[in-house]
Each structure stands twice: as structure tokens, then as C-alpha cells.
Image (cartoon, helix red, strand yellow):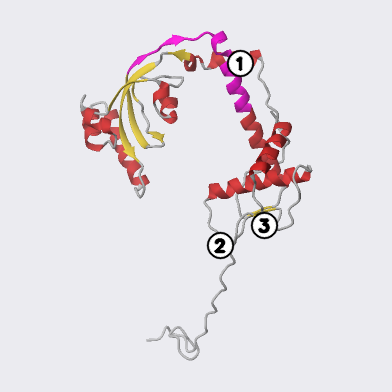
Amino acid sequence: MSCGGGSCTCGGGAGATATATAPAAAPVVAAINGITLHEPGEALAPEDLRERAWAELLRQQAVRQGLLPRHADLASPGVSIGDEAVLQHMLDAEVPLRQPDEAECARYYAAHKARFRQGRRLRARHVLFAVTPGVDVPALAARAEQALREVLRPDAAPGRFAELARELSNCPSGAEGGELGWIAPEEVAEELARELFGETEPIGTIPRLVHSRYGFHVLEVLERQPGREVAFDEVRGRIAIDLAQQARATALHQYIRVLAGQAVVEGVELEAADSPLMQ
């Protein structure tokens, strides 16, 4: 049976029209101002490609300032150890370290007093859903969310948390019902410390999954020891260093964004900015 048209060629007969094969697309090569960052066909992870792009942006800026010699080829030479020292010297001059004043340090101390307690500890337990190579992360997260909902139910049995830890946790503590014992901020991963020893310092099950480098955690705080409040004079120097480093990191990020905004960037996604450097 035909599809109805007298000249129909859908059957591929003598009247069929040949389909042209499109030429293969040329591989995309990332470049900064025409200087390529990698060989054609060389596969790089996005973060590695961005690092090369940032290094090339800085190298070209140093060339413009006469700090490094011009490179004749259209492929980036990369950054040698000697170049790194030159770039660091340039950044120190372009983005100097700004020291916070007394008022800034005092404001930070007043807003974050909980961070400056000594001897803070808490007793906690968790159910760890570990992210391992090849694991289906969305499915793992869904199972972790289900476990969290179970322990948050108003009618949850008192022993349900421990049961889930024994059944599901990928941490050795699961055998003990998820018990981690008494822990201090410096004894756990930074992501967990921020959650457990933050400004609010809750008691009970944290009502959301906590993500860490290890995976997804269902966390419950059982007891807290608040520790001793440290006077401002004792931590003023530490606060000044932290604030100076934070300001420098922000300024360096903005400096790179401005360079990216002034450059012709191809084949790599970089955050760019038109505004001048501010600290």
C-alpha cells in the first residue's frame, strides 16, 4: 500500500532522494585571546580547563606589564615555577592584603560569638549514605530523604533512628546505632562542623539532609556542652587574619573576573565582570 502520492518516494525506489552526510564538526579548542589552552582532541575536566584558563589570563596580564616575555606560538606555554613567582608578585602588587580595622573585627566577633567558644562538644549520631564510585546518587539521596522523613515523624518509635543506622548506615558507627560519641568541631569534617556547631546549635534531628565529602547524613544531636566564651581580646588577632584572608580571596576572584571580561574567551566558561576591582 502506498502513502497516497503518485510520486511518493518514501519506499526508497528510483525516485528516492539521497541524504547527504553532514561533515563531522571540528573539535572545539579552548583559547584565551587566540592562545589555545590544549591540543585538539585533548579531553580535560571542566575544572582543569578553567584552571588553565585562569593561569593563561594571569600570564598574559604579566606579559602586558612587561613582567614575562612574549610567547611566539599560538599555544599556551603554561606557567612554570619561575612564572608562578612572577605572577604571585604581580598579584601582591595588584591585589594587596587589606587589614581590617578594630571596628570590623569587633562587629564580626559580636555576630559570631558561638564560633569563639572553647571546649564546645556535642554528642551525636548519624546514618551515613555514602557516595561511592558508580553509585546512583539521585536514588541514594531519595533513600536518605525517606529515612530522614521516618525519624522526623511525630509518631516515630524512640528506637527507630538506631534501627535505621544498623540497617542502612555505611559508617562503622551503624553497629552502635549511629552513635558518634562526644565530638568537638575540629574532630569532624568541615561540612559537618558548620552544620553541627553553627550559630543556631540545635538539639534533636536536623530537619534536612547534611551533605559532606562522604555522602548524605541523617544527623541527630543528643546533648551539647557549650564550652567557655572567649573574650574579644583573646581572638582579635585570629579574627583579623580570617577577615583579611576572606577579603583577599574576594578581591582575587574579582580581579580574575575583570581579566576574563576584557579577554576573548573561547571554548571555556569563565565568570566575567566589567566592574573595576574593589576590596
**Image x and y of residue 266, in percent:** 65, 55
**Residue 184 in view in this figure:** yes
Q: Tell me: 234 left or right of 275.
A: left
- In the figure, 74 relative to 232: above or below? below
Count residues near mark 2 (Cα–Cα under 10 Å), then give few for <14, some for 14-19, many for 20+. Answer: few
Q: In the structure shown, which secondary structural element does the residue marked by tag 1 occupy?
A: helix
Residue under pointer 2: 41
Residue under pointer 3: 75
Q: In the structure shown, which secondary structural element does the residue marked by tag 3 occupy?
A: loop
Q: Residue at x 49, y 86 (%)?
A: 16
Q: Tell me: 22 left or right of 9.
A: right
Q: Residue at x 35, y 33 (%)?
A: 217
Residue under pointer 1: 105
- First-in-chain label (1 vs 2): 2
Mark 1 and mark 2: span between their CA atoms? 51 Å
Residue, far bottom: 14
The stretch of residues the image draws in magenta is 223-247
Residue 260 lies in quadrant: top right
Q: Residue at x 55, y 48 (%)?
A: 48
**Quadrant the N terminus occupies:** bottom left
Which amino acid type corresponds to the residue marked 2 in the rendered image?
Answer: Gly
Between label 3 and label 2, give the one nearer the viewer: 3
Q: In the structure shown, which secondary structural element does the residue marked by tag 2 occupy?
A: loop
